[in-house]
Amino acid sequence: MVTKAIQKTEGGNGKRIALTTADLGILHFRVKDNEIMRLIKSDMTLYEKMGHFFKMKDDYPISYEGFKHLNKVASINIVTPQKVMIDERERLNPHVERNPKTKMIETVTIRKIGIGYSPAGNITVIDKTLFYNLYSYFIESVQAKMKRVKWDKGKPTNEKQYPDCAEVGTEDKKPSKEGSWVFFETMSPLGIWINYEDSAIQDCLNEHTQRQRFGDRIAQTIVERNILKDHPAIGISKVQAKDGQQGLTATVPVYGYRHEYGIPQINEILAQAEKGEEAIEVKAEVIEEVEYEEEAEVMKEVVEDEGPKKKKGKTPAEMDEPPDDFQLSREREPGEDDEPS
């Protein structure tokens, strides 16, 4: 990176320096106590064995555990506001609805805010609200079992793996097959008849029980994962995995700035974001739906974390040949390794 010009500006949020570069364009740096805040770039390695990412169809999404690892450099602060808007009314955050008879969780609405620096040095606020409906994920888990087919010699066949687990229909027409059937409405008048004697449906019911037990934790994990995924300091959701001596690994570039934010500073940034000040970039989103496979992976992580402590595979130090790049790479300034042109 070659610096062509330096321009100093002052604004309501303190001094900034603009560096015009040949290969990266104009980079903006913040000045604190007459010192440029140092940009940290780290090429971090994620390991499938460590649960940092998982296989979903033909992709490798990063897990919540993987994003927490990447956040060691990005240093995105995630906070929970006191209120969340539901149907244009303020509610306590998170807002949990329970079944009046069983007292089990049915829905969770939760709002989280992530605060951190973008690679260009701008404070970026990611504001996300998630509506987590356990009923819809139960229906999706049943539909996933209905779609599953048998495989033969590494290829899918046209034969269903669970042909008697469920059927689409209307409430007034019960399936003629043997079994114990219950109707669940999806879109009136259509719905799904499930045979709760079938082993596949029993698996779905077990998953639903786990969602009812840990629904608030699952919702919190989903929304935090989405914040870290969308914040420009990380800005990646899937990786290109490569196979090696340590199994599947992936390298992700992560950016961060050294800062010493405390609660007062974070509260000040939140106040500035709510006022819409130009120095604060806010990206807000209401998450209506998360893919079933991703939700199932998050549920698995939460259940394993909340249940009896089990050792999660080998750590890099316990592997046969510990990789040199597991630790965070050395801090360096932008373009430190570039050769001048």
Image: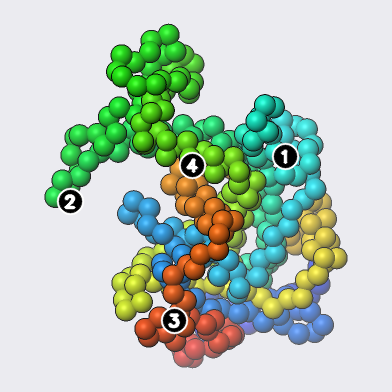
Q: Are marks 4 and 2 in contact (CB under 8 Å)?
A: no
Which residue is label 4 attached to? 207
x and y percentages locating residue 14 in the rendered image = 81, 72
Q: Tell me where residue 102 appears, x and y as whole percent.
A: 65, 30
N-term mark: 1 or 3: 1
Q: Which disc number belongs to residue 335?
A: none
x 31%, y 19%: residue: 178
Q: Residue 263 appears at what percent x and percent y?
A: 82, 65
Inter-mark Cα distance, 3 to 4: 33 Å
Q: Is residue 160 left or right of residue 253?
A: left
Give me the C-alpha separation between circle 4 and circle 2: 28 Å
Q: Residues within 10 Å of mark 2 (few under 14, many from 20)?
A: few
Q: Nearer the viewer, mark 4 or mark 2?
A: 4
Asked if marks 1 and 3 touch (Cβ < 8 Å), the reply is: no
Mark on residue 154?
A: 2
Q: Is residue 114 visible?
A: yes
Is 103 drawn above or below residue 56 in the view shown?
above
Q: Is residue 241 left or right of residue 107?
A: left
Q: Amino acid at mark 2?
A: Gly
Residue at the disc numbered 1: 95
Callout 4 crowding tier (Cα within 10 Å): few <14, some 14–19, many ≥20:
some
The amino acid type found where label 3 is placed reads: Glu
Q: Residue furthest left?
A: 153
2 or 3: tag closer to the N-terminus: 2
Give the Cα distance between marks 1 and 3.
42 Å
Instruction: Please give left or right for residue 287 compared with residue 185 in the image.
Output: right
In primary-sequence order, the first of circles 2 and 1 is 1
Question: Residue at left 41%, top 20%?
Answer: 181
